[in-house]
Image (cartoon, rainbow, N blue to C red):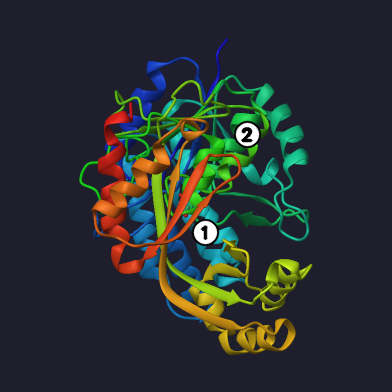
């Protein structure tokens, strides 16, 4: 039988009306058996997430200030859901446990996890499913790293006994049994862990958008949706700022070759975006998958005549940067010149020392820094071995009267990175999208 693991985000479970949508989505396909739930999110723009209210309670409790009003808000968020759904659920003992914890010696992670814990228990009661507390089956090591293999072993065994279950997202336990959370948005990670443990055919990630878009809708009006993207393409785009999934969510499902389908709880008929393990470049020749970018880079330029004959010059330059904890993004080079593109804020803290060290140990003819550089990544397996895409991108940028500061093509031919002045960033993205949009299916 086909098995689907699903995760519903905070906005998908923010109110009783959203719970009803979630139930009808689950009931539409009997394969939807293992459900991971977030804490109630925002019902509207002015609303506060339950997780944020829990963090607030913690902060107040640590300062020995009164947290009752925040706790009352949390209580009423859950009570409203319970009452409107008309289910039996005894909330008061749960709130009492949280209060007692706040009054004793509160743990930040334990408190933050209570949103997922309670929402999942309520959802399990509503669906008539078993509830699984991840403190018993998702593990971290002593140094706080996720323990993937132990978790998979134990969680697999626990879920094998259950036909259907709701598992709380966002947390697990340290070796001493105390609760530890993932970073914010971590229910995405829990969903992927569950998908791997049950050997799911698909990991459905239900949220409030119909998947990913080819580029940033704040820059390009109504960009096309991305229908299919590989894990690697996703990684490239996420690194450059596209966000829809928690970065660590891909790890578990990628290991098990499970595709992720991003779906919209408020528009369940939309197909959403498929994140797949592989996609041949021959599938979509000449097509790009996405365009993303970021501002905030600086370029360190070094020139020295006969640099090409000095063995180890590049290594020394990179070592100087590394010694200040600065990592580099790209290193375009010529015969006697090298540039290193780094994050402007990382460089700022050590700019003078870095320049001095370069002068002293490399004795260059020139060393200088240009600031305010934006990087744009055009990503797609479909670009590999297809002719003419780069030419179209560059002539579109030239036609928009934008000067290109840097070009780098990844060796996998999966991406082309273009550096432009920050003031040209939005215009360049629009020019690239307009040029290539008709080819995107
Ligand atoms: N509730 C947590 C947060 O707000 C985790 C999640 O929703 O994934 O970050």
Instruction: Identify the residue at horizontal 61%, vertical 33% (top origin).
Output: 253
Q: Which residue matches tag 1?
A: 112
Residue 330 vs 199, above or below: the answer is below
Percent x, y for residue 367? 57, 82
Secondary structure found at label 1: helix
Percent x, y for residue 319? 73, 72
Nearer the observer: mark 2 or 1; the answer is 2
Q: As rendered, which of 41 and 319 lies closer to the eye?
A: 319
Q: Is residue 136 visible?
A: yes
| Quadrant containing the N terminus in the rendered view | top right
**For the view shown, which residue lies furthest in the left direction?**
221
Q: Earlier in the sequence, mark 2 or mark 1?
A: 1
Quarter residue 119 falls in: top left
- 45 vs 102, left or right, is left
Instruction: Identify the residue at horizontal 65%, vertical 55% (top origin).
Output: 179
Percent x, y for residue 314? 70, 68
Percent x, y for residue 258? 59, 27
Quarter residue 18 falls in: top left
Q: As rendered, which of 426 and 361 lies closer to the eye?
A: 361
Q: As rendered, which of 414 and 191 lies closer to the eye?
A: 414
Secondary structure found at label 2: helix
Tell whether circle 1 marks a residue whose Cβ is less than 8 angstroms from ligand 1: yes
Instruction: Identify the residue at horizontal 56%, vertical 85% (top origin).
Output: 351
Q: Is residue 84 visible?
A: no
Quarter residue 100 falls in: bottom right
| Quadrant containing the C terminus in the rendered view | top left
Q: Which residue matches tag 2?
A: 254
Characterize the local packing of mark 2: few (<14), some (14-19) or many (20 or more) Cα atoms within 10 angstroms: some
């Amino acid at each position: 039988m086909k098995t689907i693991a699903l995760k519903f985000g905070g906005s998908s479970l923010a109110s009783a009306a959203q719970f009803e949508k979630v139930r009808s989505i689950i009931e539409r396909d009997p394969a939807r058996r293992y459900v991971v739930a977030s804490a109630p999110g925002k019902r509207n723009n002015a609303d506060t997430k339950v997780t944020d209210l829990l963090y607030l309670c913690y902060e107040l409790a640590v300062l020995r200030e009164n947290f009752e009003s925040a706790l009352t808000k949390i209580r009423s968020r859950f009570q409203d859901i319970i009452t409107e759904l008309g289910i039996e659920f005894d909330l008061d003992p749960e709130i009492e446990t949280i209060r007692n914890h706040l009054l004793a010696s509160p743990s930040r992670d334990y408190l933050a996890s209570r949103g997922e814990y309670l929402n999942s228990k309520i959802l399990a009661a509503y669906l008539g499913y078993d509830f699984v507390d991840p403190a018993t089956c998702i593990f971290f090591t002593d140094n706080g790293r996720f323990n993937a293999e132990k978790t998979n072993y134990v969680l697999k065994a626990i879920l094998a006994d259950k036909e259907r279950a709701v598992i709380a997202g966002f947390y697990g336990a340290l070796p001493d049994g105390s609760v530890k959370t993932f970073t914010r948005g971590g229910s995405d990670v829990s969903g992927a862990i569950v998908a791997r443990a049950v050997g799911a055919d698909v990991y459905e990630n239900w949220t409030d958008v119909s998947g990913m878009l080819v580029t940033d809708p704040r820059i390009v009006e109504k960009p096309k949706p991305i229908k299919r993207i590989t894990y690697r393409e996703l990684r490239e785009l996420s690194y450059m700022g596209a966000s829809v999934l928690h970065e660590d969510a891909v790890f578990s499902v990628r290991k098990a070759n499970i595709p992720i389908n991003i779906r919209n709880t408020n528009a369940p008929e939309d197909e959403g975006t498929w994140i797949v393990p592989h996609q041949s470049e021959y599938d979509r020749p000449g097509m790009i998958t996405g365009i993303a970018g970021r501002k905030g880079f600086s370029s360190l330029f070094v020139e020295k005549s006969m640099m090409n004959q000095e063995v180890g010059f590049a290594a020394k330059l990179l070592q100087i940067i590394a010694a200040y904890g600065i990592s580099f993004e790209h290193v375009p080079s010529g015969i006697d010149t090298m540039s290193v593109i780094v994050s402007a804020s990382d460089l700022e803290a050590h700019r003078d020392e870095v320049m001095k060290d370069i002068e002293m140990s490399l004795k260059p003819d020139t060393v200088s820094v240009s600031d305010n550089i934006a990087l744009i990544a055009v990503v797609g397996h479909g670009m590999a071995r297809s002719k003419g895409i780069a030419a179209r991108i560059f002539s579109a940028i030239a036609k928009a009267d934008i000067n290109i500061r840097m070009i780098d093509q990844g060796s996998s031919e999966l991406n082309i990175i273009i550096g432009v002045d920050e003031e040209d960033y939005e215009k360049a993205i629009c020019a690239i999208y307009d040029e290539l949009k008709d080819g995107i299916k």
